[in-house]
Amino acid sequence: YLLYADPRLAGHRGGLLFVGPHEPYLAYVADVLPSLGEEGVLTCTLRDLVPEGAVAHTEIDPEVAQLKASARLADAIEPAVGLYEEPPTEGMEIETPWTDVWLAASDWVEAFESRDPGTPHNEARDEVWAALLDILVDKVGDVAPAEALRRALASDEELRDTFRRAWPILDHAELVGDLWTVPAYLRRCAPWLTSEQVHRLQRADPSAWTVSDLPLLDAARLRVGDPQASRKSRQRAAALTEQREYMDEVVDYLLRTDDDPDSGLSLLRRDSIRESLVDDSGLPVAERDPLAGPFAHVIVDEAQELTDAEWQLLLRRCPSRSFTVVGDRAQARGGFAPTWTQRLESLGLHDVAVATLTVNYRTPVEVMTAAEPVIHAVLPDANVPTSVRHGGVPVQYGAIENLDEIVTGWLATHAEGTACVIGADAYPASDRVLSLTPQTAKGLEFDLVVLVDPDGFGSGVEGAVDRYVSMTRTTQQLVILGAR
């Protein structure tokens, strides 16, 4: 609907990103979208937005997870990078074949301040180096050819070493890893943290990434940029120079051997035409991450689970702040006190239009009658839509040891449909039977759901939400198995 109703997206302009909660859900979406003819939509999970997401595990310390859930922690990235962008405080003399050049501390400052504030650290490195050489060449004046002088200055090892130390090439992952392993570094970059919090965030392995690290890694990656940017830029420049020299040789040969005044080859004397002969299509260029955006619109499902920090991942990719947000406060494992309008406005999303689901077409009355008290016991104001159909099958209760018998019997009597076992991690999956956790079952639906030991899901809001979500995945039949 959005692709054809929103003028910003007409003709697949601007791009649309669909963010789902987990891979099983995306697999379902991937099956649906091509059937609608919408292959231009990008789908992903939050993990997919950051390279380290592929190996990240869940943060086991809830206090650490809570600290990393704050969007403010991303403010530590600027001073963390800024430490590697401090101009030298002492001047130096540089020898050239023509004259000695004094590089003052103020010259370093001028060069470092010349970069475009929006340019990532690694990409800006070449800008700052070029500005530094410009300053030195201007100081010398006309005592030597400018290009020759520039090459001599650029080849000075002491100058190059000093610049490397003052503006080194950085790796975003190493930068974040240093925050988690060097307490003094974290205290400097995040002075609002208490000593206890700084200690809590430290860990032995800097690259033992967790899902909670991903927002900070994303912020660091955006600020730091590509570590290979300078090398790629030099390779591209060298390749272009080589091509221009070759084409100049070809053109010069053609002009020398041309004895026809009407041939038109004299046009090759124009620099613009010579430049057009250079083919840069095969030269190295920076690889673009298709998930980096920007996107004209973002659809995010199961949004009730996103932390403030995780929201920043999405906001960075959608400057227009045009979102379709799908979520259920009753399914928030960490609780969800504010209204949706309050929540979204706190993130900087305004003009919020809320549409509330009041009718449940998926889950039978028999199942919702059992599920509703589960969530209202911990969230009295949770929105529980009213089921409009009866399935004719009551909720069945039994013992855990009956699991195989129940699933086998259902498959034997149902030639079609899918079943899902939730809460039995070791249960073998098949073409028609999935084995999921309450978290990976979110957003999905099945004809039969077998809930194994729901009391083992835990207590409080988190446990109740996991039970409620699991119970409401079925479209027909629910079986709850527990200890005798």
Image (tube, helix red, strand yellow):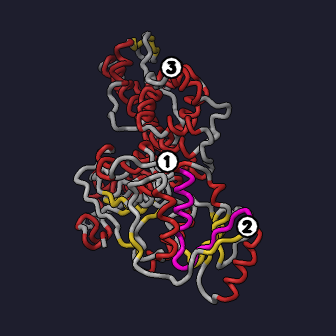
Q: Name the residue under label 2.
A: 400
Q: Nearer the viewer, mark 3 or mark 1?
A: 1
Answer with the quarter of the image where residue 107 lies.
Answer: top left
Q: Position of residue 181 (x, y in %)?
A: 61, 28
| Quadrant assignment for the C terminus | bottom right
2 or 1: tag closer to the N-terminus: 1
In the foreground, 114 or 211? 211
In the foreground, 170 or 208? 208
Work out whether residue 380 can be spotted. yes
Work out whether residue 290 can be spotted. no
**What's the residue at 72%, 81% (across, down)?**
408
Q: Position of residue 170 (x, y in %)?
A: 52, 33
User: In the displayed structure, would residue 63 be above or below residue 191?
Assistant: below
CA gap, disc 2 to disc 3?
Answer: 69 Å
**What's the residue at 37%, 51% (across, down)?**
317
**What's the residue at 52%, 62% (across, down)?**
469
Q: What stretch is highlighted in magenta?
A: 462-484
- Residue type at numbered disc 1: Gly
Q: Position of residue 61 (x, y in %)?
A: 61, 38
Give yes or no for contact between labels 2 and 1 (Cβ–Cβ under 8 Å): no
Q: Mark 3 points at which residue?
A: 162
Question: Does the stretch in magenta take in 472?
Answer: yes
Q: Mark 1 points at which residue?
A: 334
